[in-house]
Image (cartoon, grey):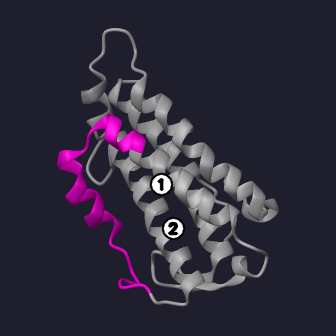
Amino acid sequence: MERCNECGFDPADLRPPDMVVAIRSFGRRYRAPLTRGLAGEDLDTIVRTSPGPGVWSALEYAAHVGQVFGEFDGRVRAALAGTEMDDAVVDWEARVAAASPGLDREAVTEGLDDAADTLGTTLAELNADEWELPTLTGRGREGPVTELAVIAVHEGSHHLLDVGRVLRAARGR
């Protein structure tokens, strides 16, 4: 994976211990924008507001990150067990669309925090050889567990930037 020109994420110097710390931090980092509103605003409406067609709301971005972490944890565990995934390719858009109507701020925040902690714990328990086990990305491309962890850190970082953007737009800023 190369540096992301949009969000600035650069995996060049990222090592497994760094990825574990980063992934575990996302629960806390997403909690603030989803639970702390400005004085007098309806935060539930703000976090559900999309700035335009084809752009998710802050709540949908956070739910997606939780889904990614959960899916990737399953893929790492499958790699450890030497089993194949049922679905090689994940339709992330469909998952978010299916979940969107029932999303709750607290449930999404707790779910992302739990998924981040679970994936972080799974990765923290890997030995050096297990980081190189083959697995599939969410797009069905084969790569080592290390690559999956890098993608997870990028997803968390990039979509946190997206959350900030859509919240500013929802607030008219």
Q: Which of 56 and 85 is in front in this view?
A: 85
Q: Residues within 10 Å of mark 1 (few under 14, many from 20)?
A: many
Q: What residue type is labelled 1?
A: Ala
> What type of secondary structure mainly makes up the magenta span?
helix
171, above or below 142, in the image: above
Tag 1 secondary structure: helix
Tell me which corner region of the image, top left, top right, bottom left or bottom right, holds residue 133.
bottom right
Image coordinates for residue 146, horizontal then vertical, percent: 68, 73
Q: How crowded is mark 2: few (under 14 residues within 10 Å), some or many (20 or more)?
A: many
**Which residue is found at the position 41% from the left and 40% from the top?**
109
Q: Is residue 115 magenta?
A: no
Residue assigned mark 1: 115
Could you tell whether 50 is left or right of 21 in the image? Answer: left
Tag 2 secondary structure: helix
Q: Nearer the viewer, residue 160 or 149?
A: 149
Q: Taking the image as drawn, is residue 153 in sight?
A: no
Residue assigned mark 2: 73
Residue range highlighted in magenta: 85-110
- Contact? badges 1 and 2 (CB < 8 Å): yes
